[in-house]
Image: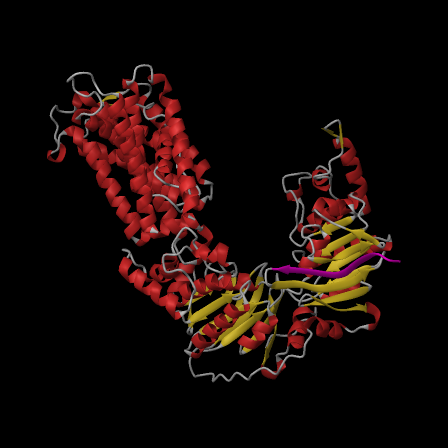
Amino acid sequence: MPGLEFRDVRKSFGAVKALRGVSFEVREGEAHALVGENGAGKSTLLKILAGIQRPDSGELRWAGERLSLGSPKEALERGVGMVYQEMLCFPNLTVAGNIFAGREITSGGRLRNGEMRRRTRILLKELHLAVHPDAIAESLSAAHRQLLQVARALAFDCRILVLDEPTTSLTDSEAEHLFTVLHRLKARGTTLLYVSHRLPEVFRLCDRITVLRDGSYAGTFPRTDVPPDAIVRAMVGRDLPPREEHTIQTREVPPALELEGFTRQPCFRGISLRISPGEIVGLFGLVGSGRSELLETIFGLHVPQGGALRVKGRPVAIRSARHAARLGIALVPEERQRQGLFFNLALRHNLVLPSRTAEGRVVIDARGERRDAQHLLERWRIKAAGIDAPPDSLSGGNQQKVVLAKWLATSPSVLLLDEPTKGVDVGAKFEIHEIVRRQAAAGLACLVASSDLPEVLSLCHRVLIMREGAIVGELAGAEATEEAVMHIATSTELRGAS
Amino acid sequence: MRRLWEVRELSTVAILLLEILFFAWYLWPEGDRTHPFLNAGNALLILKYSSIYGIAAVGAAIVIISGGIDLSPGAVIALAGVVSGGLFVEAGWTLPSSMAAGLLVGVAAGTLSSALIVLVRLPPFIATLGVMGITRGAAFIITEGRYFDVSSKLIGGWRPAGLPADWVPPAVMILLAVVFQILMTRFQWGRAVFSIGGNETAALFSGIAVGRIKASVYIISGLLASVAGIVLAVVQGQGKADLATGYELDIIASAVVGGASLAGGRGSVLGAVLGTLIFGVLRNALPQIPGATFYDRMIVGLVVIVIVVMDQLLLKRGK
């Protein structure tokens, strides 16, 4: 039976081709999985299906009939029910209020609360959801709020239910409940499009699996005759050229940074690692694996619950970012706009802020500040109108270099990088990698958290793999292939950390 | 960037000068009578009364630049006046020690605000609204409807630091404005205040002691409000619980007119003081125009809107 068809869908954002002609079909009544690495184009495809974005070319068809979706409301009316990764709910409204938000049942402008409550009760019963229609959404568990979105989609008679990484913020037992409900919906004949990078989930639920890679269609496989490894290979794609061998002499010096049993629940637990001066260690994990939280805790922004942290062999309890900076630890955060830059201050103020703060300066030395800022601008080849330019006049790549430069100006001995090349162009990415390599060669210890696998493999001497808050594997040298890393990052059985 | 702020302050000066020119022209006397507005005595009067607002506006500007808001200055002004006035008039304390007690009131109010904001994590609006109620209430409890007659106990011809008494409030205002302008622009502390107001998360990620800096900002605001309170008690000659009611809004308006953005990260101490002078001139000159008295508040409101809209238009063109 023809269901939902994507026909040669293309979408670009500026120079970035997010989708390069994707065609596949979701049959009516089946559970179809859409998998791919971060940045493969899954989200863009879903946004087009949800009516949030329009494709540059290509079309969507439902039962042979063309679907032209101009807005999320239109998508909903045409039977596309979305359950988003980040739970969209109105925490201040009741369960019934959430389910009917935007499409309230009214008569003559007056809300028919009784009717909405009655229908909500029926829906909740179908989903075996033991919550009261008048309960405030905020009081519900994460899983129940997730199921509320499912109920909302069903209330609008959706023909296809699309779920985007629905288990990311759920515990195992909560995810189990969601799966029970999805299996029941599937048995009832609801078409499901399930987007995830957790392969075990996909294999449990779905009949067929479509793989996207770099914005292109990489094949559709029936679950029954494909091993998980083949899916991983399709996600990763190309056979990579052999990595250049990194040689690093483990010198007879204490590690620049050492963690032992480092724990902050529920984000990460029992993290042990050591980084020597001059070493670049990758920390690969998918979104939600606890990477950013780990880096932020090392940097003193959160208080760990247990475990030891040693800097150059000396045990320390880091109390604040200020303290971390004084100990020679620097963090280039994931979101430069929100966490890295001051848009009300000129570039020169931005460039010298962490170093001057860490030095504990009292009086501003305006001339020294200009001189240092000018030096940093030239040294790291940051393209800007000058040191007085506002940061928002810079490109994303140059903004990222500003954040990197302001921390390198503190002369750290440990550099923590969180998605260092997120959203920057290829040229800037190359330059940032070069900067990191050069600094490492001069003795800096680097910990690079990234979900960009090729980046991790080409930049780092060895790769730690994180999943659900724990380090589940370590690969180095010839062992560290995209396939091997992805396999560990997505499989459920634990491999002991070496 | 600093050059840009200088321009911004210059535009506040320009508005002030235009305003003075307008009233000088409008109130020009017939014949050779003395000008009712443009004379040295009146200028001193304007400065003296403006300094009550101006001293507190220094603190308000710093709070606003840090991305916060302080609603308590009016009440702190009253309480500081009541406490130092009461101790001086009824308890027989010396003038300096009564003043010191008044300043402690401001520090206490500021400390309470900062504890509520930094430790309890209340929004500044709510925290300082509460502190405003507490301090105003304390002033009423202390006075029980009376007022302390400070003027009767001050010796005539009192010359603190060798200055005529009328010159002291403006001198204090100018001194504090200059000191805090320098602290805000030439000291790492001021840079930290600007960065917190511009992006608090990034400030935290940059190793700035965000909590400590924010606390210092509210304590300074309280302290400066209490200085203003003591000045008011001396200028008005009394300590009274219902003085300075609603001053907080005039003070915030002055800071905004002087270039501070309520979104944080932008503004200047000098601009805020110049802003209080703009309103000081208005409050002085309008009553001299027959029939204009009743338009006083409305004109003040219109001036705030016009100046801020102009500022935004200029800022947009600058970009």
Q: Residue at x 84, y 70 (%)?
A: A224
Is residue B93 positioned above or below A381 on the image? above
Q: Quadrant of residue A177?
A: bottom right
Query: Magenta part of the protein: which range?
Result: A1-13
Seen as rendered, the residue at the extreme right is: A1
Q: Position of residue A75 (x, y in %)?
A: 74, 48
Residue A330 seen in the figure = yes
Q: Residue at x 43, y 59 (%)?
A: A321
Q: Is residue A460 left or right of residue B210?
A: right
Q: Is residue A287 left or right of residue B108?
A: right
* Magenta highlight on residue A12: yes
Residue B83 seen in the figure = no
Q: Is residue B76 left or right of residue B150?
A: right
- How would you classify the magenta stretch by its main secondary structure? strand
Q: Quadrant of residue A342?
A: bottom left
Of residues B192 and A318, which is closer to you in this image? B192
Q: Position of residue A212 (x, y in %)?
A: 71, 66
Q: Is residue A127 left or right of residue B288?
A: right
* Magenta highlight on residue B203: no
Q: Position of residue A390 (x, y in %)?
A: 41, 55
Seen as rendered, the residue at the extreme top is: B291
Is residue B22 positioned above or below A132 on the image? above
Of residues A65 and B129, which is closer to you in this image? A65
Q: Residue at x 33, y 43 (%)?
A: B8
